[in-house]
Amino acid sequence: MLSIRLFDGPRVLVGGDWVSEFRTQKTAALFAYLSLHPQRPHRREFLSEILWPESDPDLARNSLSTALWSIRQLVERAGLNHKEVLPSDRHAVQLLSAKIDVDLARFEQHLQVGRQ
């Protein structure tokens, strides 16, 4: 299970320590977005457009690939197989909800229970 904190910026539990160093701010934003929306795959084209709207499409796709590589390395540092946590193909990428524990998602669940 990949433990993720999004309050106070994205962080991942790696070897007992909370790691918040991401390659770039956009890599951190991508990680946070995927963590908040794990229920479905996200098209690479969409992700590159929202994160690099000012860039040439080829450059944006390359930037997305680099950001995903960095996130995969972080998942591996946490002792997990990135293919099991962050499956992807040429068209889409997803953080699997069954493989992650996100503090903000748990908070939202508690709010839902409290409203009932």
Image (cartoon, rainbow, N blue to C red):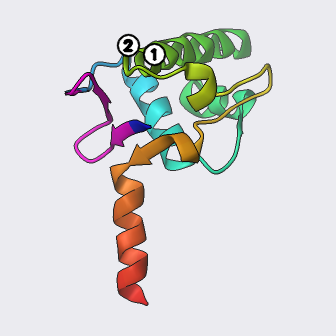
Amino acid beneath label 2: Arg
Name the residue beneath numbered marker 1. 76
Tell me where the magenta segment starts and ends, as one range.
3-17
Q: Position of residue 6 (x, y in %)?
A: 32, 44
- Expressed as whole percent of the image width and height from the top left, the position of residue 15 reads 26, 22
Residue 59: which disc?
Answer: none
**Viewed as shown, does residue 83 lie left or right of 107?**
right
Choose between 53 and 20: the one closer to the eye. 20
Quick check: 80 left or right of 21?
Answer: right
In the displayed structure, 116 sits above or below 9; it is below
Pinpoint residue 49: horizontal percent, then vertical percent.
Answer: 65, 30
Which dot, 1 or 2, sits closer to the camera? 1
Please name the residue shown 58% across and 36% down the image: 95
Q: Secondary structure at mark 2?
A: loop
Q: Between residue 70 and residue 77, name the one nearer to us.
A: 77
Residue 90 image-quadrant placement: top right
Specify the farthest residue to the right: 91
**39 left or right of 66 in image:** right
